[in-house]
Amino acid sequence: MSSKPTIIDCDPGTDDAIALWLALGAPELDLRLVTVAGGNVGLAGTTANARAVVGLSGRKVPVVAGAERSLLAPFRAETAVHGEDGLGGVVLPEGPPLTPGTAADAIRAELRAAAPRSVTVIGLGPATNLALAFTTEPALVDRVTELVLMTGAWSEGNITPAAEFNAWNDPEALHILLNLGLKPVLATLDLTAQAFVTPDLVARLSQAAGGACWKAALDILRALPSSKRFGHRGFPLHDPCAVAWAIDSDLFGSRDAFCQVELAPGPSRGRTVIDRWERLGQPPNIRLMETLDAAAFFALLEERISRLP
Ligand code: RIB
Ligand code: CA
């Protein structure tokens, strides 16, 4: 099986950490580069967490820091969910140093060296770094075989009633990615709600043996606060859904759809208006992940991460 050259942009972040370990443990993906933006916590925290997560896996994948804030929007972290440290208080050994440079330049260099339509790009945080890379060098779009984003919602948001956190933190960046002609694959809150983690599930997953990465992933799942949006029954696991698509898209039901992100100031800013029923007569510009085989998803998570050191 040939593995897919892959770039992940992220803002670790508890669910980003689990998504990174899923990618690092998946032979289907050849993770070439991890880039980091401010998001769940500030950039100093997200870069330290990305270094530690990659370092714990023992894999030599470059980690490059990028945008500290959004293109235009005011930056806001989400420490209420991820903790002040961004990993729910789970302490990891310090990882290797950052690779010098900036995220957008590193993404461009990786794409420039790649064959046409060969690189899978996965965005797990505010899309600032990806937008900067493709705005600086639009021709590099033709090196991308698939752009997968955890972003948006067709129903209610999480950071505001209208908007999902990544889209809300940098809606201009998401607007740029929606208009590259790439037809990004979106894992929205409506999809990630199906990757629902309960205490019983964590207890079941804890039966599986594994190394330090698996143990740390379980510690993170135990540390995550239950979600008010879901009646405190548990919480949705967002970012690993985007990585799981790149590993095995057969886990998902999906359809083409049209998506536009609201940029105007006000309570709807950052909302992704997603037309699943062709009501607006606009050509589809996204592939929308709609359904998830949750049992197979969590089995994939367990199998791929527990094989890491
Ligand atoms: O809204 C959920 C998304 O925002 C996830 O990517 C989470 O890590 C945060 O970045
Ligand atoms: Ca994230």
Image (tube, rainbow, N blue to C red):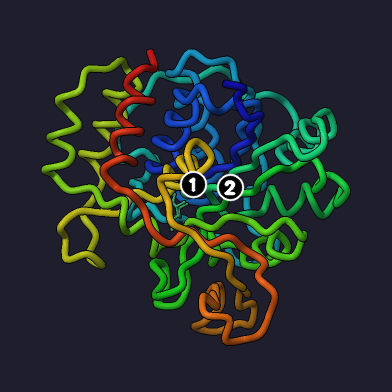
Image position of 170 with respect to 129: above or below: below
Density class for disc 2 (Cα within 10 Å; few <14, some 14-19, many ≥20) is many
Q: Which numbered marker is on residue 199?
A: none
Q: Is mark 2 within 8 Å of ligand 2?
A: no
Measuring 45% from the left and 45% from the top, which residue is drawn there?
Answer: 250
Residue 42 in the image: x percent, y percent? Answer: 52, 47
Q: Seen in the image, is 292 located left or right of residue 145? A: left
- Quadrant showing the N terminus: top right
Q: Is residue 183 left or right of residue 288?
A: right
Q: Nearer the viewer, residue 223 or 3?
A: 3
Q: Secondary structure at mark 2?
A: strand
- Label 1 sits on a secondary structure element that is helix
Percent position of residue 156, x then y? 39, 75
Whether residue 12 appears in this view of the structure is no
Q: CA distance from mark 1 to mark 2?
A: 8 Å
176 with respect to 34 (left or right): right
Q: Residue under circle 2?
A: 123
Marks 1 & 2, CB-CB < 8 Å contact = yes
The residue positioned 77% from the left and 31% from the top of the image is: 110
Image location of residue 229, percent across then percent down: 26, 67
Residue drawn at the location 65% of the way across and 39% of the way down: 120
Q: Residue at x 22, y 17 (%)?
A: 209
Foreground tag (1 vs 2): 1
Provide the residue designation for mark 1: 242
Residue 104 appears left or right of 84: right
Counting residues from the start of the chain, the first of labels 1 and 2 encountered is 2
The residue type indicated by label 2 comes to: Gly
Q: Nearer the viewer, residue 28 or 250?
A: 250
Q: Is residue 307 above or below residue 169?
A: above
Quarter of the rendering containing residue 47: top right
Q: Amino acid at mark 1?
A: Ala
From the image, which quarter does the C terminus lie in? top left
